[in-house]
Image: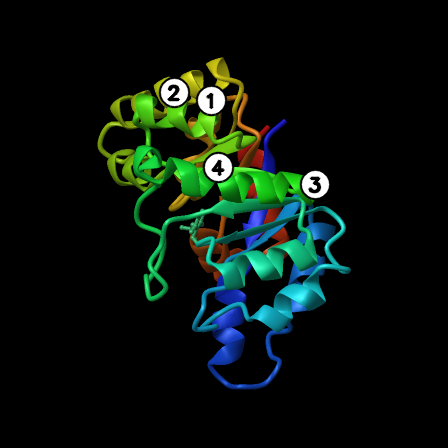
Amino acid sequence: MTNLSVNINKIATLRNARGENVPDLLKVAADCEAFGADGITVHPRPDERHVRRDDVYRLRPLVKTEFNIEGYPSEEFLDLVLQVKPEQVTLVPDAPDALTSSAGWIVGDNLGFLTSIVDRLRESGIRSSIFVGTDVDNIVLAAKTGADRVELYTKPYADLYPEDPETAVAPFVEAAGAAFSVGLGVNAGHDLSLVNLAFFHRNIPRLSEVSIGHALICDALYLGLENTVRAYKECLR
Ligand code: PXP
């Protein structure tokens, strides 16, 4: 079974636009779970422009499924996740002011750094996932950090899918196979949508989790949150 983790950063962005508590991030998280989401993802950035540090503390006792926190592993970020102890931390190489994650780690250039972070997460009982592209050698190196999983950066798949789905998914099938062969679980995320998710999942049925934010929240404007979460879950059957 592939879990759907809903990234609720966009809800926080909308809330922050007016400086009050509408929409209520905690209620949206609970509702996503009630509608069938298997997890909640947040990406607290240093400038707190969407999910804030205090949101993360308040979400922790509320999230009954899997809590996944993404971010660049600065000392500040580690301090937060080691206190909050989510089920999973996804390590991304973003600069603090990045608009969104736009590439995975070059693991070879960061092997010692990533290994030490993964060790600290494991000591706290937190599963680690490293955000990567589809380069097979890079994925094999990711296993050497001791990480539990990789998250495949799926924007290149999403971009090519409308034109040529088979060619778009092929590197991801190969990358997932490489990850499985070195004992890594495989997550995926970025620009997955109702248009491209089912095909991705059909080609990589052993995916552990997809984490989806932007398209899902946009779809909810038209379909409503409940129908939308159910529709994404349907793509994973
Ligand atoms: N995975 C990672 C590491 C991300 O940074 C993001 C965006 O915050 C996502 C998944 C979700 O991407 P999208 O919002 O395009 O669904």
First along the sequence among labels 2 and 1? 2
Residue 151 screen position, x and y as percent: 46, 36
Q: Say which element carries label 2.
A: helix
Compared with residue 198, is residue 117 higher up or lower down, i.e. above or below? below
In the picture of the structure, the residue carrying the numbered disc 1 is 204
- Inspect the image, locate mark 2, and give the three-letter code of the amino acid beneath it: Val
**Residue 29 rendering spot, x and y as whole percentages:** 66, 59
Is there CB contact under 8 Å for labels 2 and 1? yes
Tag 2 or tag 3, which sits nearer the N-term? 3
Write down the quadrant of residue 177 in the picture.
Answer: top left
Going by the numbered disc 4, the residue's amino acid type is Thr
- The disc placed on residue 125 is 3
Hey, which residue is sitting farthest top in the picture? 181
* Residues packed near mark 4 inside 10 Å, few (<14), some (14 to 19) or many (20 plus): some
Q: How far apart, in angstroms, are the residues tagged by discs 4 and 3?
A: 15 Å
In front here: 172 or 61?
61
Q: Say which amino acid is labelled 3.
A: Gly
For the residues marked 1 and 4, what is the alpha-carbon distance in whole angstroms? 27 Å
Secondary structure, mark 4, is: helix
Q: Pointer 4: what residue?
A: 115
Mark with earlier residue (1, 4): 4
- In the image, taking residue 45 as reference, residue 39 lies left or right, namely right
Q: Quadrant of the C terminus?
A: top right
Dot 4 and dot 3 residues touching (CB under 8 Å): no
Q: Which residue is mark 2?
A: 173
Q: Amino acid at mark 1?
A: Ile
